[in-house]
Image (spheres, rainbow, N blue to C red):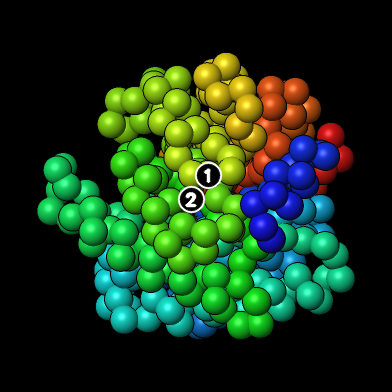
Amino acid sequence: MRREEFRECVQKKPLLLDGAMGTVLHGRGIAIGECFDALSIRNPALVAEIHRAYIDAGADVIETNSFGANRFKLAEHGLEGEVTAVNQAAVTLARRVIDGSFKPVLLAGAIGPLGVRLAPLGRVTIEEAQAAFQEQITALTTASPRGVDLLIIETMSNVAEVKTAVAAARAVAPDIPIVANMTFTRDDRTMLGNPPDDVAAKLAALDVDAIGVNCSGGPAQVLRLITVMRRIAPDMPLAAVPNAGWPEQIQGGRVLYPATPTYFADYTRAFAEAGACLIGGCCGTNAAHIAAMRQA
């Protein structure tokens, strides 16, 4: 998909994204310490089942199981040499599910943070970071039989890291649509202390096709944040992809995300009215949330 096609598509109607992958995998019995990204190779049937459930729920766009599939995050599992294999497996698997659905579903390449601090806050240079992003994005965009349709750079706390990822993407695929999403804390600031108006101005200045908020708290907070972004960047398409609320630890050590599918459905139209053209769910959401949003 070319950037112009993407812009035309989201101007016609909001696109419904899928929901979480990681928290659903954990709910299916996958241990937190396991490499979720490698499951596209090690347990493809499970990952495919989750993709299929989101398509059946009505998602217009699904994301690859590649959120942490960069060399730094994969190194935590001894898989730093498998970046290409893991990302291409994620694309091939998702494409197979889409083709089997016989529905016009778009495939987004999920790109999360590198999991390391970039200079000057850390030891990883911008050049090293860009090389890591470029390695992942190359795999996502060149996978067989066809690479991803767009890229979603998500759950970012550092605008400099987003800028680095965008530079890497443009070096690899100059005309691919890019969505850049930041995550915010309870005080409506990023982990580095940036307020949403500052974030919106900086993201809108990048060579991207949509900006927005993912993860963070529940729908109410994300609606508040994208409303600010809309005021600062009125011509930029927006994405609203909230968690199912802030996670709560309950008896037995289990983690509960409190926001129900009905609650998500109640906010779907509000997101669209606030200017969001990409609407979905993040941690704690599942196919039931997406189905409820589709019906809203």
Tell me the quadrant of the picture where the C terminus can be found: top right
Q: Image check: 32 left or right of 213?
A: left
Give residue 153's mark.
Answer: 2
Q: Is residue 59 visible?
A: no
| The image quarter in which residue 51 lies | bottom right
Mark sitting earlier along the chain (1/2): 2
Q: Is residue 69 above or below residue 116?
A: below
Q: Say which element carries label 1.
A: loop
- Mark 1 closeness class: few <14, some 14–19, many ≥20 residues within 10 Å: many
Amino acid on which the number 2 mark rests in the picture:
Ile
Residue in front for this viewpoint, 22 or 89: 89
Residue for point 33% across, 46% down: 161
Residue for badge 1: 208
| Residue at 16% across, 42% down | 121
Q: Are marks 1 and 2 in contact (CB under 8 Å)?
A: yes
Q: Residue at x 45, y 82 (%)?
A: 85
Disc 1 to disc 2, how far (Cα)?
10 Å
Rendered residue at 75%/70% (across/down): 98
| Image x and y of residue 57, in percent | 80, 54
Name which residue type carries label 1: Val
In the visual, does 16 lie left or right of 202?
right
Say what secondary structure mark 2 lies in. strand
Q: Residues within 10 Å of mark 2 (few under 14, many from 20)?
A: many
Q: Residue 232 at x, y = what percent?
A: 52, 19
The foreground one among 275 and 291 is 275
Circle 1 or circle 2, nearest the eye? 1
**Relative to residue 87, is residue 262 drawn left or right?**
right
Quarter placement of the N terminus: bottom right
Return the x and y of residue 5 as percentages of the image width and height. 73, 52
